[in-house]
Image: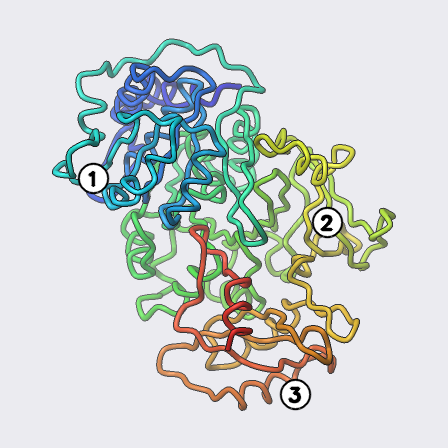
Amino acid sequence: MNIGLLLPRHARYRGDHTALVVGSQRLTYQQLNAVVNRLAHALLDAGLKKGDKFATVLPNCLESMTAYWAAAKTGLVIVPLSPLLQDTGLTTLLRDSDTGLVFGDTAFVDTFDRIRGNLGAIPDDGYILVGDPSSRPGYRTYASFVAGVSADDPADPGLGDDDTYNIMYSSGTTGLPKGIVHTHYIRAMYCMLFAQAWRMTPESVVLHAGSIVFNGAMIDLMSWMFVGGTYILHETFHAERVIEDIEKEKITHCIMVPTQIIAVLNSPAFDPKKFESLEMLQNLGAPLLLEHKHKLNEVLPGRFYELYGLTEGFFTILDKRDAKRKEGSVGGCSPFFEIRILQENGEECAPGEIGEIVGKGPMLMPGYYKRPDLTRDTIIGGWLHTGDAGYLDGDGYLFLVDRIKDMIISGGVNVYPKDIEEVISRHQAVREVTVFGAADEKWGEVPIAAVTLKEGQSVSRDTLVGWTNDRVGAKFQRIQGVAFYDEFPRNVAGKTLKREMREAYEKQ
């Protein structure tokens, strides 16, 4: 299964169909195929060959999308890296991935100046800048890199199922990032299984307003290319622009992380009538709290999907037909997947009993790049151990409790932050909430709530503590403090960085 065959197929059979919209640029499949071919040839002309790695450090733009499909056509391995990385983190990942060439936004030129002396595997002409062509001397521009090369399809690289397509680095919310390897076969499974799950067709119009650097973007990016629909990519997320384009472009499919969904629902521009074309609004990255699910299912009925998954290759999906019937669930297994809930001793849990979520299926990674030790610890007997806690109901639907590493142990009792978050989210002043454990001499750890407030709303720390502690289900769930934020610290995937928040709180 070579996913590089998809784009030229669409260019041949539906070449005039709109493929990609980025800002003011609207490309048909024929035009997109030609743009991708130029980059593919330029990469090969630079001396890269099948299996070699190149990295991108780019925001959402035409060039970042082009890079994904140039890799697919050439057998090169793409390493998408976050433009939020600092010098040390970027150096570490470029070294770890054995990258031989890197594309970076012109805003990264100072960073490249500082780190390039520590990256001997990348030649002096291997730093390609995307953006303003008047960037400083000593760097090649993207325009000059692809100038004068052929727009014809490159030669068949002879790819097979097991050939690597990308190395996707974990977000690092629970430790040092790990390079997760995906093959062409795995990405072909993304194409087919998610297109089926989202009921996508060649007439589908996908809107993506989050970063396409992180793996969650592959869920609609691969399925879009599989069906040959239209993909509208926003350079950055703005709730009002999302609402405007859903109405104007007749969007049918859209995925967002919880903070984006909340921003859309709370926007003054929100009006259910503008969403009449929408067939899917899917949440991923973290569970959407019930307060927001209730509102979503009320104002936009029959559209909500939720996905629970790991980049390592296990997923469950809550279908829109089950969104109200199983509202607290993150769904059931996709076709060809299996799931178990295990106790600490390895015994399988009974329905309703909380344990570690383990799963297997056709998207399972072959391993972490150059880390067989970590791979052995994560994939045991063919089963991926997620590090997440949950339970199955009697119908086999998964209910996510929390990350095991986020669990708070207070006085010897297991406290799951999500249970407390569900309560606090109901307060009329609270826009977003996350709960973490802070060190405590008496109890070991105690729950602390971090919140952002809705515009125009206010609440004191003591009032919110009292309101919450009157409503939680048990004494050990009572919060002992509140940290107020204008915006939560997040990684490029939109995930809240609890570790940073905990460290900041404990330094107070």
Q: Is residue 229 above or below residue 2?
A: below
| Residue picked out by circle 2 | 357
435 horizontally vs 213: left or right: right
Secondary structure of residue under mark 2: strand
| Residue picked out by circle 1 | 131
Q: Residue at x 35, y 36 (%)?
A: 230
User: What is the quadrant of residue 293 in the picture?
Assistant: bottom right
Mark in the foreground, 3 or 1: 1
426 horizontally vs 279: left or right: right
Note whether residue 8 is visible.
yes
Indicate which disc, 2 or 1, sits on the residue closer to the N terminus: 1
Q: CA distance from mark 3 to mark 1?
A: 54 Å
Q: CA distance from mark 2 to mark 3?
A: 32 Å
| Residue picked out by circle 3 | 470
User: What is the quadrant of residue 37 in the picture?
Assistant: top left
Note whether residue 363 is visible.
no
Depth check: give the residue in front, 175 or 296: 175
